Amino acid sequence: MSSDPMYSAQRLQEIADLDLLADGIDPILQDVAEQAATHLGLPVSLISVVLDEALHVAGSHGLNGLWLGETGGHPVEWSFCATSVRTRGAYVVENALTDPHHKDNPLVVQDGVRCYAGVPLISSRGFVLGNLCVVGLAERKFSADELAYLQRMAAQAVSRIEERRKS
Amino acid sequence: MQLIVWLLRTFDTSLSASLPVIPGYNLTEPTEDDARAALQRVFGAAMAETLWKAACVEALLLPGRVGPGVPLGRVADALAAQGGAAAMVARSIEIRMRTYYRLAERERTLAQRATS
């Protein structure tokens, strides 16, 4: 077994316990994604769930007509969101074309992703479930205020997710 | 929708061998070996084998002889039905399969357009 939190059976069990893969999980998560994209003026926002080998999209804005909208996720090795599972912090890529970790990422080279900002969704039991993130097709800087906004929205999303455990 | 149903409705997976790697994405068709390795990373070798064999029994397939495409989709669906962390690994396998076949289909469509 790996000691990498990406492959932690306990973390995956937490995702299962919170029923995060259910179809149409919660319209509020969809709203959070839409509000985040609108607030930051970016075309795409996701509530992602980072699994062991793939990213699952639990809520989204701006995926209509894209292959990601049909598959509901993508291989984890292309994921910007996976970084937060290991660091437990916000992750920002202002220009993916020059970013050493992502300049060869197919989502960048083939699909045009250029900027990314994501903050982790951390459950009350301390597991990183995924991210609230925004994605753009042009180079962009992200201010501290914008990251703070994403943190607030992520807290709102986690609160909503945790209510499901109580009910 | 169950993976097996989606695969049968959406793609002719028998054509997948003609596209071993999706150009530009470096993505290969998911195999039984990939799925078993994923289970081992999460559960360790012994538990992974137990879970995989149980899913194969449920899917009426022999461990070690699960082909890509529809057969692997049947075992992934059976693994998902076990629930808990195993179901999360199954969803990872499913997403990787969906992505591969969706992008393979797009490549085929583009190639057909280019030659017509």
Image (cartoon, coloured by chain):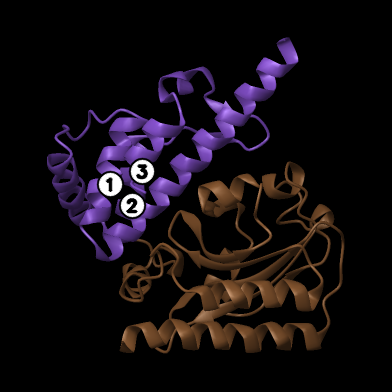
Q: Is residue A151 left or right of residue A15?
A: right
Same-subunit check for callouts 1 and 3: yes
The residue where tag 3 is placed is B3
Spot the brown chain and give its letter.
A
- Say if B6 sits above or below A69 in the image: above
* Kind of element beneath mark 3: helix
N-terminal of the pair, mark 1 or mark 3, is 3
Q: Residue furthest top?
A: B116
- Residue B52 position within the rendered picture, expressed as x and y whole percent measured from the top left: 21, 46
Image quarter of the C terminus of chain A: bottom left
Instruction: Say which amino acid is labelled 2.
Output: Ala
* Kind of element beneath mark 2: helix
Spot the purple chain and give its letter.
B
Q: Which quadrant would residue A117 be assigned to in this image? A: bottom right
Q: Is residue A128 left or right of residue B23?
A: left
Q: Residue at x 72, y 10 (%)?
A: B116
Name the mark on residue A62. none
The residue where tag 1 is placed is B77
Using the image, name the chain to which the residue with label 3 belongs.
B
The residue where tag 2 is placed is B90
Instruction: Say which amino acid is labelled 1.
Output: Asp
Q: Which quadrant would residue A38 be assigned to in this image? A: bottom right
- Residue B18 position within the rendered picture, expressed as x and y whole percent measured from the top left: 51, 17
N-terminal of the pair, mark 1 or mark 2, is 1
Cα gap from disc 3 to disc 2, whole angstroms: 10 Å
Q: Nearer the viewer, mark 1 or mark 2?
A: 1
- Is mark 1 in CB contact (under 8 Å) with mark 3? yes
Instruction: Say which amino acid is labelled 3.
Output: Leu
> Foreground residue, B50 or B67?
B67
